[in-house]
Image: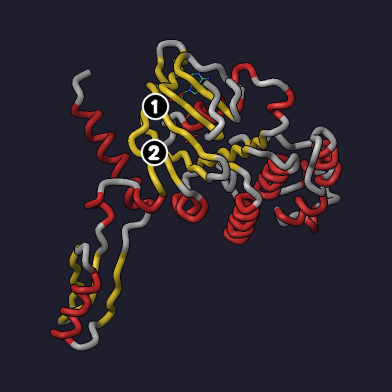
Amino acid sequence: MTSRDTAVSVTGLTKRYGDFEALKGVTFDIEHGETFALLGPNGAGKSTTIEILEGYRDRSGGEARVLGVDPQHGGLEWKAKLGIVLQSSGESGNVTVREQLTQFANLYPNPRAVDEVIAAVGLEQKANTRIKNLSGGQRRRVDVALGVIGRPELLFLDEPTTGFDPEARRAFWELIRGLKRDGTTILLTTHYLDEAAQLSDRAAVVAGGELIDIGPVHSLGPEEARIPIVRWTENGGVREQRTPDPGRTVAELVARLGEPEALEIVRPSLEDIYLDLVGSYEKDQEQVPA
Ligand SMILES: Nc1ncnc2c1ncn2[C@@H]1O[C@H](COP(=O)(O)OP(=O)(O)OP(=O)(O)O)[C@@H](O)[C@H]1O
């Protein structure tokens, strides 16, 4: 069955490296135009999943469809619809940024304008610098530029902002939002949970080769983990209360204390929820007899 409605469809995906089971039956879909984050600790199986979907690695079992095609049999026309930013940079060349991007642009039927992409990744000042003379973060920006130059329908970003300074990361977020507005489907892996929360519509959390949660990025995790905390200072000490009705708690505090000192309502971040999910998974794994 081809998936006309989904950009990516993965069912029961498995991958073995020798005796080691890196993916143990992962299932998820990504809708057209969606930004989807694949989250998980080191070694969880994120890059393996992405590389199978890009057609770089063969799977051991299960089904995968990417833009309607089995990635193990994707031809040149299919590959031209993909943008790929691999985890480690391969770009250390003797050519300049502009030369490299121009070469890549010529490989695609409908590329973006080279100078527009150079500006979008903030490399205007370095357009005529040889790639080997760029800093690590600047080379990473070249990787991102190469990933988007072909105007991909589906963009794979494997830890795209590692090594970016905070300003470059914010600029990258804007670039991704722009691509999303243009209808690009994006599959992102990142260890920066704030980045995932800012950019993604939905996320999946993988650990030990298993998918442990999937859903809209602001409703991942068990409901209890998302209960907000009201915090204030009273009689010189910090007090806090977890409550699903923070407004009511604040109203009661105001009635009792007047304006509460250092009042704040803290909602657990995606990082808090992620750590909770992965921590529970790891604890359960320790309890399973070998
Ligand atoms: N070529 C390989 N041969 C053997 N084992 C491999 C190979 N590639 C990956 N693995 C193992 O498969 C597991 C998943 O690796 P993968 O690179 O997919 O993880 P990841 O989630 O991307 O991790 P990270 O966050 O560190 O990038 C790891 O335990 C890794 O050691």
Where 120 falls versus 87 (above or below)? below
Residue 267 location (% of width, % of height): 32, 62
Q: Farthest residue to the top: give it.
A: 18
Q: Position of residue 228 (x, y in %)?
A: 26, 62
**Neighbours of disc 1 within 10 Å: few (<14), some (14-19), many (20+):** many
Please indicate whether residue 179 sits to the left or right of residue 102 in the image: left
Residue in view at x 81 percent, y 39 percent: 105
Report if the beta carbon of the residue with label 1 is closer than 8 angstroms to ligand 1: yes
How are the colours assigned in the image? secondary structure
Q: Please name the residue shown 47% across and 49% down the image.
A: 201
Q: Position of residue 17 (x, y in %)?
A: 47, 15
Q: Residue furthest bottom?
A: 258
Q: Quadrant of the C terminus?
A: top left
Q: Please state which amino acid type lies under the numbered disc 1.
A: Gly
Left/right placement of residue 269 relative to residue 57 reads: left
Amino acid at dot 2: Val
Q: How many marks?
A: 2
The one nearer the camera, 36 or 99, is 36
Q: Which residue is mark 1?
A: 209
Examine the image and state in which quarter residue 250 appears: bottom left
Eyeballing the image, is 140 above or below 58?
below
Relative to 76, 88 lies left or right: left
Percent from the top left, x then y, of residue 71?
60, 22
Q: Is residue 150 visible?
A: yes
Disc 1, SS: loop
Q: CA distance from mark 1 to mark 2?
A: 10 Å
User: Contact, CB < 8 Å: mark 1 with mark 2?
Assistant: no
Which dot marks residue 205?
A: 2
* Secondary structure state at the residue bearing disc 2: strand
Q: Residue at x 66, y 34 (%)?
A: 82
> Relative to 174, is 185 above or below?
above
